Image (cartoon, rainbow, N blue to C red):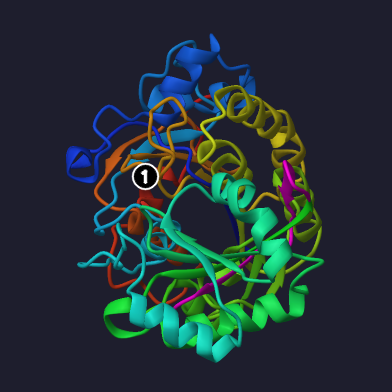
Amino acid sequence: MVRAILIVMDSVGIGAMPDAAQYGDEGSNTLANISKQAGGLRIPNLERMGLGNAREIPFVSPQSNPAANYGFMAERSKGKDTITGHWEMTGIILDQAFPTFPTGFPDDFIRRFEERIGRLTLGNEVVSGTEIMQRLGAEHVRTGKPIVYTSADSVFQIAAHEEVIPLSELMEICRIAREMLQGELRVARVIARPFLGEAGNYQRTTNRHDFAVDPPARTLLDRIAEAGQKVLAVGKINDIFNGKGVSEHVSSRGNDDGISKTIEYLRRDDPGLIFTNLVDFDMVYGHRNNVRGYAEALEAFDARIPEITGILRQDDILFITADHGCDPTTASTDHSREYVPLLVYGPKLKQGVNLGQRACFADLGATIAEYLGVQPLENGTSFYTELKGEKQHD
């Protein structure tokens, strides 16, 4: 029985790509800048695996005998959002970025949307979600008007207090928005952003839900499912792919819970792919420019890596990567156009192989497809043959 385990550290970029300036992200380097500003990162397991070998990170030392194989990947698709990154990992290259709305959504759309949902709205701004929640939360509670907003990403976000607009109604409002946002308005995601609390102390809950568009073509997930193997999804993976190709999914309440759910799946006997997204790096720390919190989240993830590697079976392969950057040390609170790290470990694999700079995220998916013996992807170059054989180091 062969299995691949793919863990995406959401937003953990490893340096600006050559075209980063076109996205306003010149100089971004999520991992390096966090380590520099935090005075170092206590991530001994990622360090031993070769994270510091992949690219230079202050205070993260390169290893002479890395325990894993290492490299980094460039994003070929246009964009720097979650869906674009995850889709590219599974074989889809987007030639055109999803639309963004730097001045808010068109007034005529907002009016039609309000008519459909039977409520007026607040906001329609390009703004940080936590900021607009605090600023307009009290008015929302008083009037029952949901708060709508966007960011530099291709998203339409709808925030509501759970005691004012019940979760079931908020989800239906989001489904209506998803149905209406087509053509030139076809954003990558509609996101439900429920919150609780009182004026001055509103807090998001963990009941977020993403409503994505369908992938435009068959992905790695579809190929695995069609081959009779399982795709077990943890966190927002199911939302990102709109359920396409997913055999079974479980939500997670933060990184720690996501890791625990991944371990639960690892204890089962299902051939195929375990696909996990750890969203806290991005949602809780990156977008809020919380450097210390981001550093601590990296350290907390690192501390649990032995739990994962310790129960891998002989034919398992673990991949650790990211989908984009979100450098909390910059003035921006948005995603950043960055390379992403690539660490690959398996009990039967070589160790210490420098996989170099991969031309696209799809190289990872192509590798998983080859290893699992499913139909090859249309994009990406597998590096599985570079990893097969006797270990280079003991």
Helix, strand or loop at mark 1: helix
Percent of width and height locating residue 59: 49, 10
Residue at 76 percent of width and 60 percent of height: 265
Depth check: 144 or 281 in front?
Answer: 144
Identity, as a three-letter code, of the amino acid under mark 1 = Glu
Report the magenta residues as a range. Answer: 198-213
Relative vertical location of residue 41 with respect to residue 39 in this rendering, above or below: below
Percent of width and height locating residue 107: 35, 76
Dividing the picture into quadrants, the one containing residue 147 is bottom right
Residue at 21 percent of width and 67 percent of height: 96
Dividing the picture into quadrants, the one containing residue 54 is top left
Q: Is residue 126 magenta?
A: no
Relative vertical location of residue 215 with respect to residue 353 in this rendering, above or below: below
Residue 115 visible in image: yes
Q: Is residue 106 left or right of residue 328?
A: left
Q: Mark 1 sits on what residue?
A: 386
